[in-house]
């Protein structure tokens, strides 16, 4: 496990930790409120944010498949998460592990190897995933990390907000793969309730040409840092987008269960 910020309260390590300037305007995460669409619920003040950006197995031949068809074939191979303090914007903790694929075993029991396309895209090598743990063990350690950070109750009551860049990470791949592997997830992680930074950004920057990670950074006058399609580098860049957003307050509606959306995309 690579906890590059050390303990949950630690700071430092690779990737500059975003720090808010008290004299500037920014997205005030502590002022965000959450309300589920069904049924109506009282607003909950956000105290913490968890940012996710997984990477998965992939191949050039995926181009002809729908996203859900791809999810049925592929596996998560990098599992990063950043914990942000909603009041200060500081990154308070980092969880980062690579994940060993276990499906598509050949005659000797080895899992299907990473494609050259996948390694070229993500920078993740066969050696890195071969030495990693399977998804069930990584998720177990992630949940232990969440508990060690004191976030379990906040995630259960909604005062900790999950954010991803698009619907693939938390809306499709993780719940679909977990179900396929009979991996039980806590309700806050497996119920497809999260906020999509693409949607939030588009609401505030209607003139932005793109809600890709690079497009959002460019709209904010920022350059990407690290490697594109590195999960941990993408997480750190997402944190920079949140930090640089000049919205003082916002209301976020958690995505409802995505069953109908998934059916529409099949």
Image (cartoon, grey):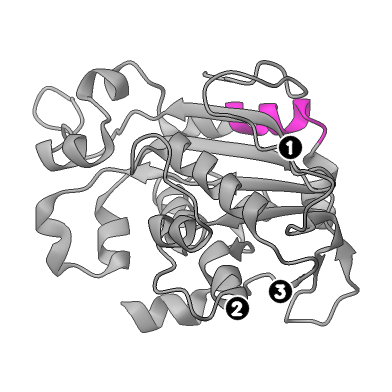
The answer to whether the residues at label 1 and label 2 have Cβ atoms under 8 Å apart is no
**Distance CA(mark 1)–CA(mark 2):** 24 Å
Which of the two marks, 2 or 3, is nearer to us in this view? 2
Q: Nearer the viewer, residue 186 or 67?
A: 67
Is residue 66 toward the left or the right of residue 84 in the image? left
The answer to whether the residues at label 3 and label 1 have Cβ atoms under 8 Å apart is no
Does dot 2 land on a helix, a strand or a loop? Answer: helix
List x then y, in percent, for residue 130.
28, 20
Magenta region includes residue 148? yes
User: What residue lies at 74% left-to-right and 57% top-to-bottom?
Assistant: 26
Is residue 53 toward the left or the right of residue 152 in the image? left
Q: Is residue 41 above or below residue 114?
A: below
Magenta region includes residue 151? no
For the question of whether residue 185 can be seen, the reply is no
Number of the label disc, if any, that sits on residue 203: 2
Q: How many marks?
A: 3
User: What residue lies at 23% left-to-right and 25% top-to-bottom?
Assistant: 125
Q: Nearer the viewer, residue 142 or 242?
A: 242
The residue carrying mark 1 is 90
Q: Quadrant of residue 158?
A: bottom right
Does dot 1 land on a helix, a strand or a loop? Answer: loop
Segment tinted magenta in the rendering: 141-150
Q: Quadrant of residue 176?
A: bottom left
Q: Nearer the viewer, residue 220 or 76?
A: 220
Mark 1 neighbour class, 10 Å CA radius: few under 14, some 14 to 19, many 20 or more: some
The residue carrying mark 3 is 253
Mark 3 neighbour class, 10 Å CA radius: few under 14, some 14 to 19, many 20 or more: some
């Amino acid at each position: 496990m690579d906890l590059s910020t050390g303990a949950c309260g630690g700071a430092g390590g690779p990737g500059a930790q975003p720090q808010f300037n008290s004299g500037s305007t920014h997205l005030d995460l502590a002022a965000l409120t959450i309300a589920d669409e069904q049924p109506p619920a009282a607003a909950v003040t956000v105290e913490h944010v968890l940012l996710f950006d997984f990477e998965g197995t992939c191949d050039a031949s995926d181009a002809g498949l729908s996203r859900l068809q791809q999810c049925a074939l592929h596996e998560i191979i990098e599992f990063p998460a950043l914990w942000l303090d909603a009041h200060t914007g500081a990154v308070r903790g980092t969880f980062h592990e690579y994940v060993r694929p276990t499906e598509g075993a050949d005659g000797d029991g080895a899992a299907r190897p990473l494609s050259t396309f996948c390694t070229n895209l993500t920078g993740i090598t066969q050696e890195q995933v071969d030495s990693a743990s399977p998804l069930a063990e990584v998720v177990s350690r992630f949940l232990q990390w969440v508990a060690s950070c004191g976030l379990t109750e906040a995630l259960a009551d909604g005062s900790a907000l999950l954010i991803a860049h698009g619907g693939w990470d938390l809306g499709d791949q993780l719940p679909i793969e977990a179900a396929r592997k009979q991996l039980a997830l806590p309700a806050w992680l497996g119920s497809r309730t999260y906020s999509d930074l693409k949607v939030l950004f588009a609401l505030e920057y209607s003139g932005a040409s793109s809600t890709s990670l690079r497009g959002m950074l460019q709209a904010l006058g920022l350059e990407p840092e690290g490697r594109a399609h590195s999960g941990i580098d993408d997480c750190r860049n997402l944190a920079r987008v949140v930090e640089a957003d000049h919205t003082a307050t916002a209301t976020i509606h958690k995505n409802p269960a995505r069953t109908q959306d998934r059916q529409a995309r099949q």
